[in-house]
Image (cartoon, rainbow, N blue to C red):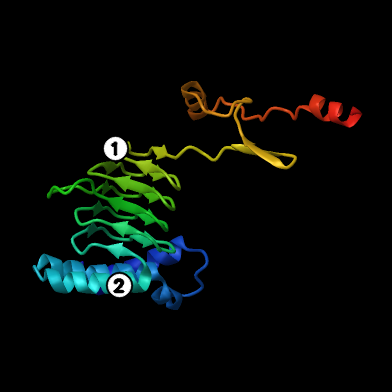
Amino acid sequence: MGYRAYMKEERAFFMEQDPSLRSEREIYMMPGYKAIRTWYITHRLYQKKHYVLARWLSLRCQQKTGIDIHPGATIGKRFFIDHGVGVVIGETCIIGDNVRVYQGVTLGGTGKQKGKRHPTVEDDVLIGAGAKIIGSITLGKGSKVGAGAIVIRDVDPGATVVSPPAYPVRQKQGKMSNLCVRGKERWSRDDIQCLQKGRIMVNCPPKDRSKTESKDHE
């Protein structure tokens, strides 16, 4: 697909995905759009083995947008990057069509070996803010990755994967703040397993009033 046709589809997809946009003119100022536009050029240079020029343009764009897309990455049509700061896409990463990525996402590799070492993201995938997709794994078509998730295994098509939700570990008791679960100061293996299954109850022990009452009587 030619440059004009590719970027025209990009602008249409940005307008569809971002409700804050009022006109296409705003798209030209968005870091995600700038990064994709630069990637299109650097990827063509990379394919023609102009590696140094491609990397130079890519790093210049990274300095301006905070988005690092390697020129060797393969990206399909209608790729949407929202906000974009901190997004990293590795050299051997393959991204399908209609993929949405939010800030802080890493599509990274493992080890120093050459060859395919970055993720494959199939069509219609959504990757939430701060998610880390590591290694030569596959995110199946239509799958979703929750914000902050760390993914190191394949994700089935249509599946949704999330990281453990936030849970309370401190409750204020007067002037003291104790780390506790079920009245204990440390987590056991059973506690962690129950937490992962959503069965744990986090309750700090009640304040010992007997000592305070004895001091008052004295």
Give the image quarter of residue 180.
top right
Give the distance between the C-alpha atoms of the residues marked 2 and 1, in whole angstroms: 31 Å
Which residue, given by chain and number where applicable, does mark 2 sit on? Answer: 61
Does 114 sit above or below residue 5? above
Q: Residue at x 29, y 45 (%)?
A: 134
Judge left or right: residue 35 versus residue 114.
right
Which dot, 2 or 1, sits closer to the camera?
2
Q: Disc 2 vs disc 1: Cβ atoms closer than 8 Å?
A: no
Residue 211, how many percent across, how many down? Answer: 80, 27
Q: Inspect this view and state whether residue 7 appears.
A: no
Q: Disc 1 designates what residue?
A: 154
The N terminus appears in which quarter of the rendering? Answer: bottom left
- Name of the residue lying farthest toward the bottom: 25
- The quadrant of the picture occupied by the C terminus is top right
Q: Secondary structure at mark 1?
A: loop
Instruction: Please state if 108 lies on the left or on the right of 20 as rendered.
Output: left
Q: Position of residue 107 (x, y in %)?
A: 30, 52
Q: Nearer the viewer, residue 101 or 7?
A: 101
Instruction: Name the residue type under label 2.
Output: Cys
Q: Check disc 1 and give the amino acid type.
A: Asp
State the residue at coordinates (16%, 49%): 112
183 to 42, vertically: above or below: above
Q: Residue at x 60, y 26 (%)?
A: 184
Indicate the position of residue 123 as horizontal and vertical percent values. 30, 49
Whether residue 12 appears in this view of the structure is: yes
Residue 45 x %, y %: 14, 71
Q: Earlier in the sequence, mark 2 or mark 1?
A: 2
**Which quadrant of the figure has residue 176?**
top right
Crowd tier of the residue under label 1, counting other residues whose Cα lies within 10 Å: few below 14, some 14–19, many 20 or above: some
Residue drawn at the location 43% of the way across and 50% of the way down: 128
Q: Nearer the viewer, residue 169 or 154?
A: 169
